[in-house]
Image (cartoon, grey):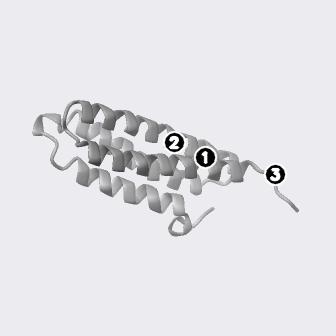
């Protein structure tokens, strides 16, 4: 079991989720139950799955939930690209968010690699 506040990846993922709520605050009201909802659910899914994995009793289970979190990050990338193409999100906002998502994906991959290394006893 891991202490969430000590996990850099979880902290970055929660910060990203907050940034995403801010970025989607001005989306049109007709997207409230569409793209806005989908984006926010994917954003919250990332730190939530990291947290759920951290609470598991094995590295294998933790890696599985990190994989789910990573899948949500790719979903999020797609939704932001669509938002940009629909002119709901500026190029600058898109690039900043994609940079944060890509950083989180790299951290996730590295963390999974570290967890999959055999223990040295």
Query: Image check: 64 left or right of 19?
Result: right
How far is mark 3 from mark 1, CA to CA? 16 Å
Q: Nearer the viewer, residue 55 or 76?
A: 76
Query: Image check: 34 left or right of 63?
Result: left
Q: Residues within 10 Å of mark 1 (few under 14, many from 20)?
A: some
**Secondary structure at numbered mark 3:** loop
Please tell me whether residue 37 is drawn above or below residue 116 in the rendered image.
Answer: above
Q: Which mark is residue 99?
A: none
Query: Image check: 103 left or right of 35?
Result: right
- In the image, farthest residue toward the right: 121
Q: If you read the primary sequence from the N terminus, does the residue marked by circle 2 or circle 1 appear first?
A: 2
Q: If you read the primary sequence from the N terminus, does the residue marked by circle 3 or circle 1 appear first?
A: 1
- In the image, farthest residue toward the front: 92
**Secondary structure at numbered mark 1:** helix
Q: Residues within 10 Å of mark 2 (few under 14, many from 20)?
A: many
Q: In the rendered structure, are the residues bearing label 2 and label 1 in contact, judged by CB atoms less than 8 Å apart?
A: yes
Q: Which residue is mark 3?
A: 118
How far is mark 2 from mark 1, CA to CA? 8 Å
How far is mark 2 from mark 3, CA to CA? 22 Å
Q: If you read the primary sequence from the N terminus, does the residue marked by circle 2 or circle 3 appear first?
A: 2
Please tell me whether residue 66 is drawn above or below residue 55 in the rendered image.
Answer: above
**Secondary structure at numbered mark 2:** helix
Residue 110 in picture, x, y percent from top left: 63, 51
Q: Quadrant of the C terminus?
A: bottom right
- Please identify, in this view, whether the residue under mark 3 or under mark 1 is nearer the observer: 1
């Amino acid at each position: 079991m891991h202490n969430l506040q000590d996990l850099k990846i979880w902290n970055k993922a929660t910060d990203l989720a907050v940034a995403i709520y801010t970025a989607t605050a001005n989306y049109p009201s007709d997207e409230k139950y569409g793209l806005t909802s989908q984006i926010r659910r994917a954003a919250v899914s990332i730190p939530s799955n990291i947290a759920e994995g951290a609470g598991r009793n094995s590295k294998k289970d933790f890696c599985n939930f990190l994989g789910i979190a990573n899948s949500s990050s790719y979903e999020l990338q797609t939704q932001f690209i669509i938002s940009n193409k629909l002119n709901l999100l500026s190029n600058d906002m898109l690039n900043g968010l994609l940079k944060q998502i890509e950083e989180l994906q790299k951290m996730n991959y590295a963390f999974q690699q570290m967890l999959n290394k055999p223990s040295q006893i």
